[in-house]
Image (cartoon, rainbow, N blue to C red):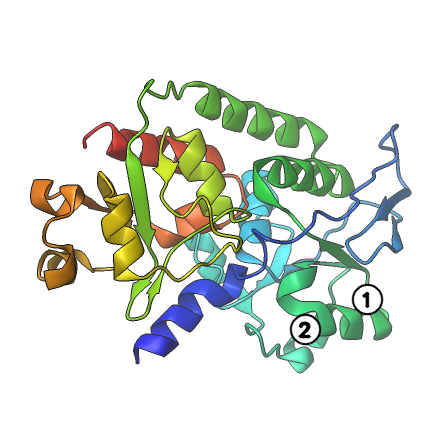
Amino acid sequence: MRKKLLFFLLMPLLFIGCSKPGKNIPQPQGSFPLTITDAFEEEVTIEKPPVRIISLAPSHTEILFQLGLEDKIVGVTNWCNWPGEAQKKTLVGDINLNFEKIVSLKPDLIVGIRSMQEENLKRLAQMGYKVLSLEPAGIEGTIKTIETLGLVTDRRAEAGRLIAKIKEQLASIKPKTTRPKVLMVLDLDPLYTVGPGSLQDELLVRAGGENIAAETNTPWPQLSDEIIIAQDPDVILVTADFQERILNKAAWRNLKAVKKGAIYSVDPDLISRPGPRIGEAAVEIAQVLGEK
């Protein structure tokens, strides 16, 4: 059961943080038709603003809603749970897409993330659908994705306002001179945390924390008790209900964070999706770290 929980926590965005951003190169004038170079290094031409959009990524769905396109979205994945209205849309599956349902929705644009559903995106393109595959990596990659989706949907002004809001939220964070050492726990048995190349790591640093897994070479490292004890984090952030288990974990009983009870929950969707809420995510983490 635990492995299944970790799978569903990581799988929707497993490769986003460590992927290289696609070359989302819009035409400078922004007039239709538009030609975009997607994450497959292929040119995709959008003849006119789409009116029947299917989103195959939760982060894309969030962006589209924030751009005011709720009436244009006809289908989303089972993972797309924010905003709440997203779940009222037709669900087209997750890793395993319901192609018959997609066909029935008659989309004129399908947007997805290459590293999440590469084969499905290729198949949909081969079926003749207009498919735009993007690859948001980190905060800057997320902003570029918002720009691109705003461009191809003729929501440039909305995209600009959304980006300005995100930048304002990030700028509002004033890290302390001494950064607290932080362990972010994705799972306990085995222990998975976040490392360089993950969106969570970037948000943690922008929020004023020092990631104790900063020296690892993977976005999703496993750390031993010995390493965690040696690093002795000031704060532990958890993405599930692990507080009691951590407090009762004998090997960790002398950690600063455990002795102070500085163990805080963070929303796993909020901190892992490269979408319109990344500024909010950084602010929330900063607020938590300020309570250490």
Q: Position of residue 104 (x, y in %)?
A: 69, 75
Taking the spot 75% from the left edge, 49% from the top edge, the residue there is 22
Instruction: Identify the secondary structure beneath mark 1.
Output: loop
Q: Is residue 29 above or below residue 77?
A: above
Could you tell me residue 239's position as x and y percent? 31, 55
Q: Is residue 81 visible?
A: yes
Q: Is residue 249 visible?
A: no
Query: Percent position (x, y) of residue 34?
Result: 88, 42
Q: Is residue 106 above or below residue 220?
A: below
Answer few, some or many: residues within 10 Å of disc 2's Cα (few below 14, many 20 plus, some between 14 and 19): many
Q: Nearer the viewer, residue 40 or 181?
A: 181
User: For the C terminus, which image quadrant?
Assistant: top left
Q: Looking at the image, which residue is at 10% across and 49% down? A: 254
User: Could you say which is closer to the camera, residue 18 or residue 177?
Assistant: 177
Identified by mark 1, the residue type is Tyr
Residue behind mark 2: 102
Name the residue beneath numbered marker 1.
Answer: 129
Q: Nearer the viewer, residue 242 or 233?
A: 233
Contact, mark 1 vs mark 2 (Cβ under 8 Å): yes
Judge left or right: residue 60 versus residue 239: right
Disc 1 packing (10 Å; few <14; some 14–19; many ≥20): some
Q: Amino acid at mark 2?
A: Ile
- Alpha carbon distance from label 1 to label 2: 10 Å
Q: Quadrant of the N terminus?
A: bottom left
Q: Position of residue 164 (x, y in %)?
A: 57, 23
Mark 2 secondary-structure assignment: helix
Q: Is residue 94 above or below residue 142?
A: below
Q: Earlier in the sequence, mark 1 or mark 2?
A: 2
Numbered mark located on residue 263 in the image: none
Between 207 and 155, the residue placed more toward the observer is 207
160 displayed left or right of 245: right
